[in-house]
Amino acid sequence: MKMPAMTFHPKKLQATTRGRIAGLGAALTLLAIGGLASPAESRGRYNDGEYVGEPADTEWGTVQIKALVHDGALTDVQILQYPAHRRRSAEISNWALPILRSEAIREQSARVDMVSSATVTADGFQQSLASALQRATQ
């Protein structure tokens, strides 16, 4: 289906174009205030509270996470235990865990991208956070 060409003039929009823009603006406003979201979507997917994940024993040490949930959303991830018994383990944990934390909050999930050179720590992070988030859904 061929779409009609729209003429745009900076000072004078065609009436049909103004109507389309107004309609789009109204739809965006409804989305922004949650007018099109179902009640379940507006509540969030997790129960509010603090949830400690199971410790994940990895090759380089234990990783344990606490998930903080507010208004149904993952709002913070605290690192309770992490590999730090060797200098290299501490270096990897110190740069990888903040990345994993940010990614988990952004994704609202334990399914986060692996961090290069920190695969073992990232795997432990995912395991512990997944168990914390599982508790947040019960």
Image (cartoon, helix red, strand yellow):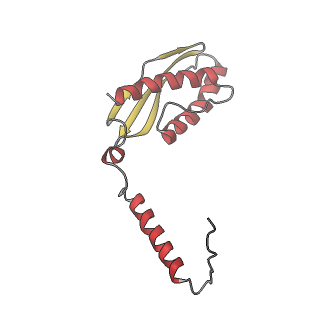
- Please determine whether, in this image, residue 31 is positioned above or below residue 60: below
**Count of number-bearing discs:** 0
Residue at the spot 60% in from the left edge and 12% down from the top edge: 59
Q: Position of residue 24 (x, y in %)?
A: 48, 67
Q: Position of residue 106 (x, y in %)?
A: 51, 42
- Please determine whether, in this image, residue 27 is positioned above or below residue 65: below
Q: Position of residue 28 (x, y in %)?
A: 45, 63
- Which residue reaches farthest front? 1
For the C terminus, the quadrant is top left
Q: Quadrant of residue 36?
A: bottom left
Q: Quadrant of residue 5?
A: bottom right
Camera-side residue: 49 or 35? 35
- Which residue reaches farthest bottom? 11
Residue at the spot 59% in from the left edge and 87% down from the top edge: 11
Q: For this view, does 7 lie left or right of residue 32?
A: right
Q: For this view, does 120 lie left or right of residue 39?
A: right
Camera-side residue: 126 or 16? 16
Camera-side residue: 48 or 96? 48
For the N terminus, the quadrant is bottom right
- Please determine whether, in this image, residue 75 is positioned above or below residue 32: above
- Which residue reaches farthest right? 117
Residue at the spot 51% in from the left edge and 36% down from the top edge: 104
Q: Position of residue 3 (x, y in %)?
A: 61, 69
- Please determine whether, in this image, residue 5 is positioned above or below residue 11: above
